[in-house]
Image: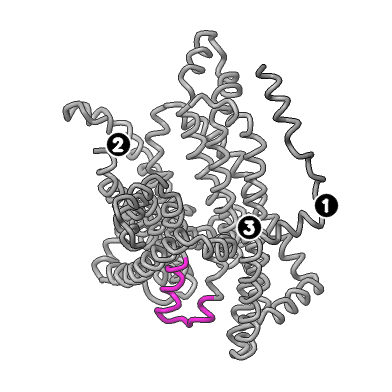
């Protein structure tokens, strides 16, 4: 796709419609935002608010505490989802026994569980981390499960004939490498949903992090600050998803070559 | 000779057994591990839950017997029916609007115009924004009423419909497009007979994602925007630490979500059945 040489002119040609649209879009937004009965803050006001919140440190520190939540919840979900997916994918009796219930639980939206989880685990870090954990766990586990369960049987047969006897050896040399694309796409889905879970937990509790900023500015209808607090979330989600797509491609490169 | 050998083989076979009765078929089905292992687990799980639930502080936990009791109470008072209808109303209205607006918009974006490429990053940005955080904006734009809830449902489900329709239209079979072009097919016929049918499997997948997100959207709206419907039942009971009715509502929500998504699945199989039969790839 990108075999042709990079030329600045062609790149400019490709970027031109994007640039033109961005200018029109943000220009219209700015003009509308400056009118009197506007229900949107002007772009410049959002930028000022963002600069202000960065300067007084409230945005970076909120982002930091949100990230802490996300990292702990995501990592524990990744580990637990990996172990659960491998166990369910490899052991048929376990799969038969638990899968119907896990699929049913998967179908319950995490938002519905949030009040429950927070009543059970309290409003401290553990309750919030559990909400993030629940948001990421199922996509990761289900993908690992699908990848492990559908290992091509001929691969397993070949490795058996090459004297890979132990289950652990089989997992390490054949099953898990064959499931890498599934595992990676599970992690990619998981991190995206983790950002959502983080926002849900924080907005519900109004304690600390980006969610608390959003709840506070939302309650006082300070739209410019509200926008400035919202914008980092989709950026974070897109950035992390992009990062995992890159890792996914890296991890899967051996397949093509 | 061959035919004789074949008929010989046929006569050698034992006469066909009588078809098993309904009871026996049911019994045979229940004897497979696919049935009895989850059933046993369910039994053990409920017993353990009941025992644990009776010991733990009732403020925090409820045994299944009390959840069932709460369910019956809620249903008898009519609260559950009203809440379910409220939830379904916003869910179906938002989802229906998402399909009505998402399909034409997706077709428009998918037809290879610059427009589609230019809008894509903005659509992705909206898609990546958690809906909880735009609740304050929805309050300002629509108020906390019905229209606000429908908007939250709509916003969550319209984007997968747009993205998948556009993708399906973009990947229309080039041979069909060429034939259509050589017959100088008018644009509306091209959309009606070539682009939309070809995109059906993608659209159906988009509708399934949209259905899941619509269920989440209606709950977000009912928990964070206006305290009503089943989400409201969950939220109100959680605030007063009444675990049993909360769990009953959570289970009903899970059931409704599953039914809603699987009805979209059934629709997908119906509509896309012919497609998988004669697929070129």
CB of mark 1 within 8 Å of CB of mark 2? Answer: no
Residue B248: % across, % down: 68, 72
Residue A257: % across, % down: 23, 38
Which residue occupies the foreground of this view, A86 or B165?
Answer: A86
Q: Which residue is mark 1?
A: B21
State which mark lies toward you, 3 or 2. Answer: 3
* In the image, residue A118 lies in the stretch drawn in magenta: yes
Disc 1 element: loop
Q: Is residue A168 left or right of residue B29?
A: left
Q: On screen, B97 above or below B197?
A: below
State which mark lies toward you, 1 or 3. Answer: 1
Q: Which residue is mark 3?
A: B257
Residue at left offset 42%, top offset 77%: A207
Residue A184: % across, % down: 35, 53
Which residue occupies the foreground of this view, A198 or A120?
Answer: A120
Which quadrant, please, contains the N terminus of chain A?
Answer: top left
- Work out which residue is located at the far top of the displayed protein and give it: B183
Residue at left offset 53%, top offset 50%: B155
Q: Which residues are magenta?
A: A117-134
Q: Is residue B188 left or right of residue A58?
A: right
Mark 1 / mark 3, whichever is N-terminal: 1
State which mark lies toward you, 1 or 2. Answer: 1
Circle 2 chain: A
Residue A123: % across, % down: 46, 81
* Dots 1 and 2 on the same chain: no
Q: Within the image, what quadrant is residue A103 found in? A: bottom right
Marks 1 and 2 sit apart, C-alpha to C-alpha, by 71 Å
* Dots 1 and 3 on the same chain: yes
Q: On screen, A232 above or below B250?
A: above
Q: Which mark is residue A19?
A: 2
């Amino acid at each position: 796709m990108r075999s042709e040489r990079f030329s600045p002119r062609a790149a400019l040609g490709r970027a031109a419609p994007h640039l033109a649209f961005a200018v029109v879009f943000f220009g219209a937004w700015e003009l509308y935002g400056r009118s009197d009965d506007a229900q949107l803050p002007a772009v410049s006001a959002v930028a000022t608010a963002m600069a202000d919140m960065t300067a007084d440190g409230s945005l970076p520190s909120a982002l930091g505490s949100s990230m802490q939540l996300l990292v702990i919840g995501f990592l524990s979900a990744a580990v637990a989802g990996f172990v659960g997916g491998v166990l369910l994918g490899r052991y048929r009796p376990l799969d038969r026994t638990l899968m119907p219930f896990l699929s049913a639980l998967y179908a319950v939206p995490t938002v519905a569980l949030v009040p429950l989880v927070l009543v059970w685990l309290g409003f401290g870090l553990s309750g919030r981390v559990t909400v993030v954990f629940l948001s990421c766990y199922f996509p990761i586990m289900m993908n690992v499960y699908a990848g492990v369960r559908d290992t091509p049987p001929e691969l397993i047969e070949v490795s058996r004939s090459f004297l890979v006897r132990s289950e652990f050896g089989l997992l390490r040399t054949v099953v898990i490498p064959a499931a890498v694309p599934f595992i990676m796409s599970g992690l990619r889905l998981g991190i995206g949903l983790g950002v959502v879970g983080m926002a849900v937990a924080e907005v519900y509790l109004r304690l600390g992090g980006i969610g608390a900023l959003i709840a506070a500015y939302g309650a006082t209808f300070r739209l410019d600050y509200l926008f400035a607090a919202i914008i980092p979330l989709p950026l974070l989600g897109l950035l992390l998803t992009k990062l995992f797509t890159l890792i996914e491609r890296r991890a899967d490169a051996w397949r093509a070559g | 000779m061959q035919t004789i050998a074949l008929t010989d083989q046929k006569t050698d076979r034992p006469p066909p057994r009588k078809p098993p009765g309904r009871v026996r078929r049911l019994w045979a089905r229940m004897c497979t591990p696919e049935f009895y292992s989850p059933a046993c687990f369910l039994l053990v799980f409920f017993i353990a839950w009941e025992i644990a639930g009776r010991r733990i502080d009732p403020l925090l936990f409820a045994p299944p017997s009390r959840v069932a009791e709460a369910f019956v109470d809620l249903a008898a008072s009519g609260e559950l029916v009203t809440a379910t209808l409220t939830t379904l109303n916003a869910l179906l209205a938002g989802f229906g609007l998402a399909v009505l607006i998402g399909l034409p918009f997706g077709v428009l974006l998918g037809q290879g115009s610059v427009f589609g490429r230019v809008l894509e990053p903005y659509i992705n940005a909206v898609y990546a924004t958690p809906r909880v955080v735009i609740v304050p904006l929805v309050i300002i734009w629509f108020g906390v009423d019905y229209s606000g809830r429908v908007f939250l449902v709509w916003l969550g489900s319209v984007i997968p419909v747009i993205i998948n329709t556009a993708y399906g239209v973009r990947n229309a079979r080039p041979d069909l497009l060429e034939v259509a072009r050589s017959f100088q097919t008018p644009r509306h016929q091209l959309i009606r007979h070539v682009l939309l049918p070809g995109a059906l499997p993608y659209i159906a997948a988009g509708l399934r994602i949209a259905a899941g997100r619509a269920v989440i959207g209606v709950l977000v709206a009912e928990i964070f925007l206006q305290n009503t419907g089943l989400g409201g039942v969950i939220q109100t009971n959680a605030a007063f630490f009444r675990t049993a009715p909360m769990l009953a509502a959570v289970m009903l929500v899970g059931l409704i979500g599953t039914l809603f998504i699987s009805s979209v699945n059934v629709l997908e199989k119906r509509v896309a059945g012919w497609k998988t039969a004669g697929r070129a790839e």
